[in-house]
Amino acid sequence: MRKLLLLIWLGACAAYAQTIDGSHWPDGTIDIGQGWSVHEGDDPAWAQPGFDDRGWQTVDLDNQGAAQPGWRWYRLHLKLTPEHPHLHLLMAGGDGTYALYLNGRPAEGSGLKGFFGVRRPTEQVVSLPDEENDLTIALRTHAIPIYVGWHLPLFLSANLGTPDAIENQRLALESERLYAAMPSIAINLLLMLAGLSAFALYRSQGGHPEYMWLGLYLFLLGTSNGLLYCSVYGLHPLAWNIVFADPLVYVFTIMQIEFTFRFAGQRVGPVWRIYEAVLPLPLILVALFAGGWLSSSVYVLVQAILILPAALLLPVVLFLWFRRGNREAGWLILPSLLPAATTALYDLGSASIYTGWGKADFLLQSIPIGPVPLQVSDLGDFLFVLAIAVVMFFRFTRVSREQTRVAAELEAAREMQQRLVPAKLPQVAGLTIEAAYFPALEVGGDFYQVMEQGDGSTLIVLGDVSGKGLKAAMTGALAIGALRTLAAQNLAPGALLARLNRQVFDTQDGGFITCICVRVGASGATTIANAGHLSPYRKGAEITLEPGLPLGLTPAVEYPEIAFVLATGDTITLLSDGVVEAMNAEGQLFGFERTRGLSGQSAAAIAAAAQLFGQEDDITVLTLTRTA
């Protein structure tokens, strides 16, 4: 009776293990994905070959569906024929979700990993011991919440075979995985390069911040999507997408809003500002999802809903601007639809799978473009890059033409500036005249002239045109032309300013000119009249003048004069308001006290001190000293 029971037990054990003949495999490999025993829980004893697992459920390893949370063990018993060659085991499973044991011993290279180490299923090869023909393979598995949230399978396949055959199969699986990843990686690298190109445009045309926002948008969009698909295809851990890629979605959406408004020359309104402020708030969901406290379906739905306003409303806003006559806004209508909309569609497709609805999962399927498989979001991003390249080409061309026109105007203004500020002052007998001029812009509105009169006296005029740039330079040039005509008539300073005021009023289209006129005779007799300008200085004190209205405000103005004798060695200092209005980093003005204290120094020293303090406006200083 005992012999009969022993024979029955030995027969059961023989049936219990799969017999593998390693010498008759046509391609050198065999699929061992079927007939595995599985049990929930965690017990180190389940790795041992002598453990009785006949009460466990039998499953196919490669047909388990999406990974489930918790601990599970899988076991498979193999009986190899004595003549079997050296064998390798190829497992295609979630990297970091399982630890492999051979006859109770942990296999080198496999093991469970934490949040920042788990990747989607990849290929792993393990060498089997040659001296053992009875083999128990045990898999200790644990899927962390982020892996479960992605609905990834624990295992795709398990194969046994000779080293060369297994290596060929591993390369085939890896190539298939990487081949699908290459289009996504290439397109997102293209986006990042386009972003860097936009930064280069911004450096060449610094007055156009839309290029900076476009560069940030493209670079962050390419980075975010690149990290996503690198996670999808197992090139780096899944955590990179959660920790880095997903937060960038909200950031590049803000960049898209800023670029759109700057490109169209519009101000971002309060509603859009509130939307931008709300966008970063869901970042807390990242931590909740990573910790398993938030379901993946809720996570992707929130992300899709939050970026949909940018995807749907920005094109509407652009269309409204276009209808109001903003042609460039019309260029962006179609391109602005693509990236955010395709990202939202990807999230909706993911939510369709996660919730079990399934009717929108086609949004995650790649679109074959010839031999190249493209994701929906990749296709949208690629078309966006092409469209935005065309748009920015026309924009850059228009801006370049505009800059050329401005440069021509600036050159014309420089020529006028030479008339406003003499390159060389005339030599006047009995007077030493010095001048210093520092424009705040490339073309300023200050001017001064030194003209000898027919009676041997010298006329010095210093003025400041309101405004800046070409218009101010043109106004100053017109004033100087009229001034030279009037100077030939040997008019007194008050009469000269009154006549000049009338001509400026008749020719000036808005604006005004402050001006001071000084006439010094050969004997030192000096007459001064002031049209709303700063008072000059003499011997460290202001010369008291009755100020008149600036030129060009009203046609009939009388300008009173003062007269005195300029003694030998005395100096009169004339200056523009750019000196007293110089301001330092703390907001302090250079002011009248500092100006008064420096008024006895040379023109160059006074102007340099004001400029060093903090130039805000054109700085002009002119000194005249009577010599023997």
Image (tube, helix red, strand yellow):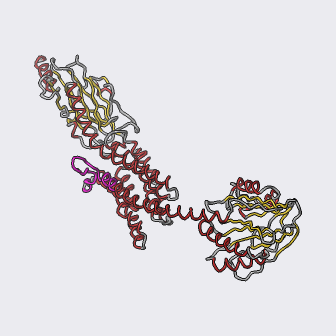
Residue pictured at 38% horizontal, 57% vertical: 388
Q: Is residue 287 above or below residue 22?
A: below
Q: Name the image quarter holding residue 523.
A: bottom right
On-image quarter of the N terminus: top left
**Left or right: where does residue 59 sit relative to residue 394?**
left
388 part of magenta stretch: no
Residue pictured at 71% horizontal, 77% vertical: 500
Q: Which residue lies furthest to the bottom in this view?
A: 556
Report how many numbered discs are placed on residues in the image.
0
Does the rendering let one see residue 277? no
Q: Name the image quarter holding residue 529.
A: bottom right
**Left or right: where does residue 2 sit relative to residue 547?**
left
Does the rendering let one see residue 4? yes
Residue in front for this viewpoint, 444 or 194: 444
Q: Name the image quarter holding residue 409.
A: bottom right
Residue in front for this viewpoint, 361 or 512: 512
On-image quarter of the C terminus: bottom right
Q: In this view, does 177 lie above or below 485?
A: above
Image coordinates for residue 237, horizontal then vertical, percent: 37, 39
Image coordinates for residue 571, horizontal then vertical, percent: 84, 61
Q: In this view, does 302 lie above or below 13?
A: below
Image coordinates for residue 343, horizontal then vertical, percent: 35, 54
Image coordinates for residue 6, horizontal then vertical, percent: 14, 19
Residue in front for this viewpoint, 84 or 258: 258
The magenta-colored residue range is 359-383
Residue in front for this viewpoint, 378 or 210: 210
